[in-house]
Image (spheres, helix red, strand yellow):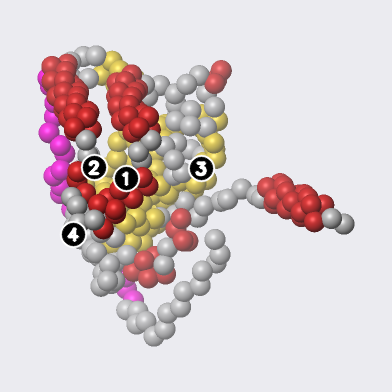
């Protein structure tokens, strides 16, 4: 057998192996709460009574996630605490749902909050299905400098809307206009992408036509240094002019965009960076005193 025939045989076998791997791969099922370290699961936030109002729904239907959690008094010393900032959230693969509202102990969670250790909090999150599919939904807390602390996950089945109609997320603005947040502002996004794409291509085209890219200019700079000459002398007057024109056009585009946006949208709201105060509930005390002599943690698989 010739060398070329051997290479062809090896290539065909490799393609066959890759094809079999693709066909044999199964779907990945996420269990986020089991992926966390044992110390994080047992010494941070204890989730319980997690429930959802419905597990089978269609695009556009609403679902309520409720439950409670206890913030541990034995918070790990190496982990940032709850005093820095906490945001109540849900974990789901991708933007499959939109959040309509959320409450923590009855307080609207439009912004972040600070929690106390050793307290019980009851949460409620109202969502609306956006994308059809099968999802593993988790309640979670986004803790500043610590990351996400995930609770128990529940499987949800989201079916497509009748007639496969697109999801609509309408909202009435302060001026009384009704807009669809799914498509609002997409035109402006496309225009700005086109503007900067054209600017970038024009800048690259200028250098491509001259055939003076990185390697040739690097060699020129090196030769100038070896000859004790000024490397900046390779920059011609024409290049200075072209760079100045691009700089001026860029500033003009940015200023024009700012003035246009300021004139079109005169009413704005400040950034929401404050904290909301939420009072916790003391954990109930039992009639028994428990002394821990030994503790073990077994991860039951992922």
Which region is colored magenta? 266-288
Q: Confirm or deny contact between disc 2 and disc 1 (CB under 8 A).
A: yes
Specify the quadrant that holds the C terminus. bottom right
Q: Earlier in the sequence, mark 3 or mark 1?
A: 3
Q: Between marks 2 and 3, how big is the CA–CA gap?
A: 59 Å
Q: Confirm or deny contact between disc 3 and disc 1 (CB under 8 A).
A: no
Residue designated by label 1: 217
Against 279, is 241 above or below? above
Q: Secondary structure at mark 2?
A: helix
Observer-side mark, 1 or 4, equals 1
191 sits left or right of 18 in the view: left
**Residue 11 shown in magenta:** no
Dot 4 crowding, Cα within 10 Å, few <14, some 14–19, many 20+: few
Please identify the quarter of the rendering in which residue 199 is found.
top left
Q: Earlier in the sequence, mark 2 or mark 4?
A: 4
Residue 135, numbered circle: 3
Residue 83, numbered circle: 4
Specify the quadrant that holds the N terminus. bottom right
Q: Between marks 1 and 4, how big is the CA–CA gap?
A: 54 Å
């Amino acid at each position: 057998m010739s060398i070329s025939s051997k290479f062809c045989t090896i290539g065909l076998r490799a393609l066959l192996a890759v094809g079999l791997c693709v066909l044999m791969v199964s779907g990945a099922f996420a269990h986020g709460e089991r992926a966390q370290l044992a110390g994080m699961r047992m010494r941070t936030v204890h989730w319980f009574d997690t429930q959802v109002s419905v597990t089978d729904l269609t695009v556009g239907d609403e679902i309520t996630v409720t439950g409670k959690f206890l913030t541990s008094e034995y918070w790990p010393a190496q982990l940032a605490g709850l005093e820095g900032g906490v945001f109540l959230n849900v974990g789901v693969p991708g933007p499959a749902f939109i959040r309509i509202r959320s409450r923590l102990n009855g307080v609207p969670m439009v912004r972040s909050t600070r929690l106390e250790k050793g307290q019980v909090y009851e949460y409620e999150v109202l969502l609306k299905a956006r994308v059809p599919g099968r999802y593993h939904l988790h309640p979670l807390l986004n803790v500043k400098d610590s990351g996400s602390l995930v609770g128990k996950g529940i499987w949800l089945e989201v079916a497509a809307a009748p007639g496969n109609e697109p999801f609509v997320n309408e909202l009435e603005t302060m001026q009384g206009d009704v807009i669809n947040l799914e498509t609002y502002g997409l035109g402006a996004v496309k225009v700005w992408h086109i503007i900067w794409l054209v600017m970038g291509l024009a800048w690259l085209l200028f250098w491509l036509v001259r055939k003076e890219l990185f390697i040739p200019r690097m060699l020129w700079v090196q030769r100038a240094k070896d000859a004790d000459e000024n490397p900046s002398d390779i920059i011609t007057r024409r290049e200075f002019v072209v760079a100045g024109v691009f700089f001026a056009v860029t500033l003009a585009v940015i200023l024009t965009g700012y003035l246009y946006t300021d004139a079109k949208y005169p009413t704005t709201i400040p950034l929401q960076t404050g904290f909301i105060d939420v009072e916790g509930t003391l954990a109930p005390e039992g009639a028994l005193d428990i002394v821990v002599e030994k503790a073990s943690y077994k991860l039951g698989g992922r």
